[in-house]
Each structure stands twice: as C-alpha cells, then as structure tokens.
Image (cartoon, rainbow, N blue to C red):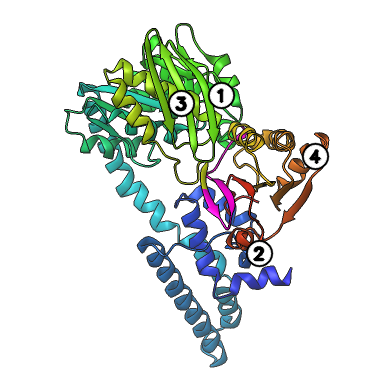
Amino acid sequence: MLKSLLSLYSWRYPAAVVYMLQSTEYQVRPYLRWYWQTNNFSQVMYRRVLDPTKAARLLLLAMRLGIIVQLLVGLGLIAGWQWGHLTGGLYFGLAVIVSYPLIWAHAITLPLVLGRLLIVAPRHRMYIKESEAIFRAHPGVKLAIAGSYGKTSMKELLLTVLQEGKKVAATPANKNVSISHAYFAKKLTGDEEVIIIEYGEGAPGDVERFAHITHPTHAIITGIAPAHLDRYKTVQRATEDIFSVSEAVAARQVYVNEESELAKRAMRKKQQGYSDKGALGWKVAHITVGLHGTSFTLKKGKRSLGLHSGLVGRHQVGPLALVAALAADLGLSDEQIERGIAHTMPFEHRMQPYELDGAWIIDDTYNGNIEGIRAGTKLLAELPAKRKIYITPGLVDQGREAASVHQQMGELIAAAQPDIVVLMENSATLDISKGLQDAGFAGELLVENNPLDFYTNINTFVASGDVVLMQNDWTDNYA
C-alpha cells in the first residue's frame, strides 16, 4: 500500500502518465479508465517504455513544469503561514503539494480534449466530407476489406500481386478509420485502376459508415472472431457491423472467408466464399507448408497456376487463392500472378519466421484473436522440431467472453502438443491454464511475471532445433 502511494510522487510518475496516454493513442476515456485502475505507477512501464516522440516530449515537459509550479505554489503558501501572513496557509499548502499527481494526471488531458473539440474534430469532418465526393467519383475498382482479423495482410497481398499488372493504391499500414481514408483520398490521382481500402471496426456502425463514405465496388470479409467486445458487447453485433458492407456492394462481388465458421454462417445469398479449397471457381491442390513458405497449385478449367509464397501456414492458402483469382478476373496474366504471389512475404509480427541460434522463432505477436490461435497452433503441430515451444500472454478485448475464449485457447494449444508452454502472468493466465488442463496437456507449463525481460533474453531460453511460436501481444493498459 505504502509503495503504491509513494509511486505517485516518484520522478518516473510523469513519464508513466504520458506513457499511458501514448499507449491509448491519446484517447482520454481509455486513458482515464486505465489510470483509475492502476494501483502502482512504478509498475506501469514493465512491458515497454515511453517512445520519445515530439508529442510525448512536449506533454512530459508540460507536466513536469506544471508540477514544479504547483509545488512552488504549495511551498509559498506554507511559507506565508510561517511568516504569519496567511491564516490556513499550512493546510492549503499541504493540500496543493499532496494533490499534484491527481491534478496533473487529469490536467494533462485538457489540451487534448480542447484541441480535439475545437480544432481537430471540425477539420476532420471537413476532410471526411471531401473524401466522400472523391471516392464516389473515382472510376477504379474500389475494394473494401473488413473483418475481425487478417485485414492488413489481405490488403498487402492484393497490393503486392495486383500491382504486377495494374495501377493500384492502398490505404497505408493499418490506417483504417474515416480520417485515415480521407487523407488517403487526398493523395489519389484518379487514374488508379484499383484502390484498396481497409476498414477498421471498433464500435457498432463503423463499417456501415466507412462503406457510405468510400463507395466500394467489391468487398472482402476476412473472418469473424471475438474482438473489440468492450464496445460491441457481443460477437453477433460485431458480425452485423462487418457484414453491413454488403449493403453497398453487389452480392456476387462480396467474398467471404469460409474457414471462419462465424463468417460462413453469416454469408448472404449469392456471396462467394474462399478457403484453402479454392476461390471464385479456382481449385486448390498439392499444398506444401514449411518454414520457408507455402506452395500449391490453382486450377480453373485448362488454366493452371503453380504458386509459391513466402507466407507461412496452411491458413494462408485461402487468402492467396482469392488474391490470385481476383487478379485473374482483373486481367492479369498467369506469369504476372505467379510473380506477384512469389513476391508475397510475411508481414512484421504476423507469422514472421526467423532463425535464432539454430532455433526457428515464428513471431505472431501482432494483437490477435481466437482464429489466429487456431491457425498458429495448427501450424505448430504440422512443423517438425526437436522441441516445440508455445509462448503467449493471451488475448485482449474479449469482453464478457474472455474466460471462455481463453479456455478454448488453452485447448487449442494443448492439441498442438508443444513440449513447453510459456504464459505471461495476467488476468488470462488461469483461464488458459484451465483449458490446457482440461485438454490433458502433458508438457511443461511456465508462467513468467516479467514479459519484457523474457522476450529480451529469449535467446537464453531456446536451443538449436526448437520451433517457437510466439502469439499475440498484451499492452500495459490490460491487467
């Protein structure tokens, strides 16, 4: 208790507060929720540290200067009482000094709130309105990508392959909300043959609004899984929002990942599915999976494609097949499609393999979901190794489904039969452990209470011949 109280007055406290703001992307509501749930601020930055961006440095400087001024005011009040000039100065001064952590943790949000309300929000509304006209008038194929997972990967696959034969533009990185779409629209020249727009979903109505603004001609639904349930509350509401893109696109031009059971169940009449069996009339055969990539053949009538991708995992076949099929529909030659697929490589922290001291590490630490766990554990089961190791902190944003999802996660991990499972100690640990136990996991279970130290020194944990799968991330704003 005393240690937690003293953490409010440490020199590191302002950095911890700014770190919390930065980690919540300067969103005041999630920042305040995290702040009031925190008991010890000295333990806030134990997974990562503050990224010293210009905004972070300015906020940190402002907070420290403000604290110094408040302390001087408090000391001045006490001095006034001591000199007999200020009745009650002692109590007022002590109150001013003692209250500075609470006051500045909230005061630091004022420029964010006022700036967003008076400057940012009006400007954003104007940009978004302008972008709607740009998208509506654009003559190219406008391909929207929505889903609980796999959106950025699908976008990058399409961009890599289609640009072999078309002029293509795509929203950058994971910039997938209306203002990001508006900035993207400003950069379009109007002569693009294909534009690819990723839709992020964070709350009910998001996808419907994005579709209304961007006017897609085609849509891909990459899958449905429990995600952002703190806002959606139920998977059904998330599903309805994601599938609302269907209202803006002809049914035959909506492509749904049939390997996602929830998405498959929600498919509407005449919508087309894709999977590791094929896509848009093309059939998949002869799948080979290894640490150096994935190969398969794709056939439709007399046309046959021999495809090899640097992407790792059987779950990559369905998206690759759809991309190749769409490329064919858009007029790319067999040679262009095969060359484009050959250029596809793992994306950062998404099933990204690398060698470490003779062991193979598969980095899949981008924030995940249960379908990502399913794909990863199947891959781990399929790969040969002297020793198989699975590492995870669990899943975030699971809402009321958290316990059941993490127990299911434990069962999926157990089914892969790893020799060692390493869990990061947090609120998900017990539920994952229960799932492992219920599924009869017979390997070694380790629980780490210092994730940063473990990941930093993972080379001391692995040995030559190991295959290590690291899945998902758990930022400090989750307990």
Residue 44 located within the stretch drawn in magenta? no
From the image, tell me which residue sits under label 2: 40
Along the polypeptide, which appears first: circle 4 or circle 1? Answer: 1
**CB contact under 8 Å: marks 3 and 1:** no
From the image, tell me which residue sits under label 4: 441
**Visible residue check, residue 143:** yes
The disc placed on residue 237 is 1
Q: Nearer the viewer, mark 2 or mark 3?
A: 3
Between 59 and 201, the one nearer to me in the picture: 201
Graded by Cα atoms within 10 Å as few (under 14), some (14 to 19) or many (20 or more), the crowding at tag 2 reads some
**CB contact under 8 Å: marks 4 and 3:** no
The residue tagged with tag 4: helix, strand or loop? loop
Q: Is residue 170 left or right of residue 394?
A: left
Along the polypeptide, which appears first: circle 4 or circle 2? Answer: 2
Between 226 and 456, the one nearer to me in the picture: 456
Residue sitting at x 80%, y 39%: 441
Graded by Cα atoms within 10 Å as few (under 14), some (14 to 19) or many (20 or more), the crowding at tag 1 reads some
Q: Position of residue 163 (x, y in %)?
A: 27, 31
Residue sitting at x 50%, y 41%: 350
What segment carries the magenta color? 354-370
Residue 362 located within the stretch drawn in magenta? yes
From the image, tell me which residue sits under label 3: 319
Q: Is residue 329 left or right of residue 396?
A: left
Graded by Cα atoms within 10 Å as few (under 14), some (14 to 19) or many (20 or more), the crowding at tag 3 reads many
**Visible residue check, residue 204:** no
The residue tagged with tag 1: helix, strand or loop? helix
Along the polypeptide, which appears first: circle 4 or circle 3? Answer: 3
As measured in the structure, the alpha-carbon distance from the residue carrying label 4 to the one carrying label 3 is 32 Å
As measured in the structure, the alpha-carbon distance from the residue carrying label 2 to the one carrying label 3 is 44 Å
Along the polypeptide, which appears first: circle 3 or circle 1? Answer: 1
